[in-house]
Image: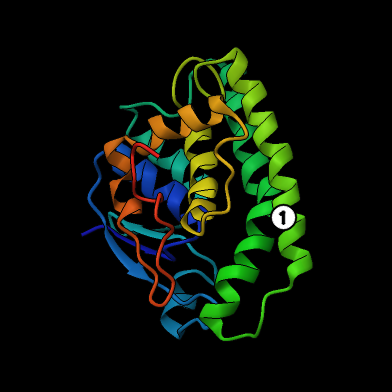
Amino acid sequence: MNRLYHVALSPFCRKVRLTLAEKKIEVELVEERYWDPSPDFLRRNPAGKVPVLRMDSRLMAESQAICEYLDETLPNPALIPADPEARYEVRRLCFWFDDKFNAEVTRPIMNERVWKKIRKEGYPDSRAVKSGLAAVKFHLDYMGWLLDQRRWLAGDVMTLADFAAAAHLSCLDYISDVDWNRSANVRDWYAKIKSRPAFRSLLADQLPGLPPSPQYALLDF
């Protein structure tokens, strides 16, 4: 059995989960408290990070590397285009969300509103939360601008860039921290992604003591 060591509300784990599900690869999900790593987990990934995918006796780490490996070895359906310019745009947007969006939005909001509670590290820093909520407006506007010109974020077909963006936004949606009324284009795009069979396992996630927002699992939200 393939096995993914993950955390439910990690956008990097979610990107890999979406890729696996889109390619119809069955996988056992194993929750890993990476902030309190076990010796076994550190042997699997000395960096002490999730996700880690065990597949065909191979251990793989780093979400982008995992997703690209899966797309190269299991090319149908393709999530990264063959054309160099289109492939560049997909990778550029993946890094936009995994680097810039994560640093400005996902990490500060999730750390303060979710992980501090899970780890029992005290009260959230309201300044960090406000900073993240202010930054997300810029990113939603940028996504809306992209979707004014394209059917999907990186072009006219769905790609790994859409999964990267949806992975981050779905974490924030779990705690109701996305203003879906800010951009009709982004709302419609997310509704399309959210309705895909690959998204079903994400919508079933539940963190003990932290239930999802009322609209989180609704396809018509």
Q: Find residue 83 and report its horizontal and vertical position in percent.
A: 53, 15
Which colouring convention does the figure follow?
A: rainbow
Q: Is residue 162 left or right of residue 24?
A: right
Q: Is residue 62 visible?
A: no
Seen from the viewer's position, the closer of residues 96 and 200 is 200
Residue wearing tag 1:
132
At a point 49% along the width and 41% down the height, the residue shown is 166
Front one among 192 and 155: 192
Please, is residue 32 above or below residue 50 in the view? below
Q: Position of residue 60 (x, y in %)?
A: 44, 56
Q: Is residue 126 above or below residue 62?
A: below
Q: Position of residue 200 (x, y in %)?
A: 28, 47
| Quadrant into which the C terminus falls | top left
82 lies left or right of 142 = left
* Residue 216 or residue 25, whichever sits in front: 216
160 up-or-down from 28: above or below = above
Exactly how many numbered labels are in the figure?
A: 1
SS state under label 1: helix
Give the residue type that dot 1 points to. Gly
Is residue 213 visible from the viewing direction of this image?
A: yes
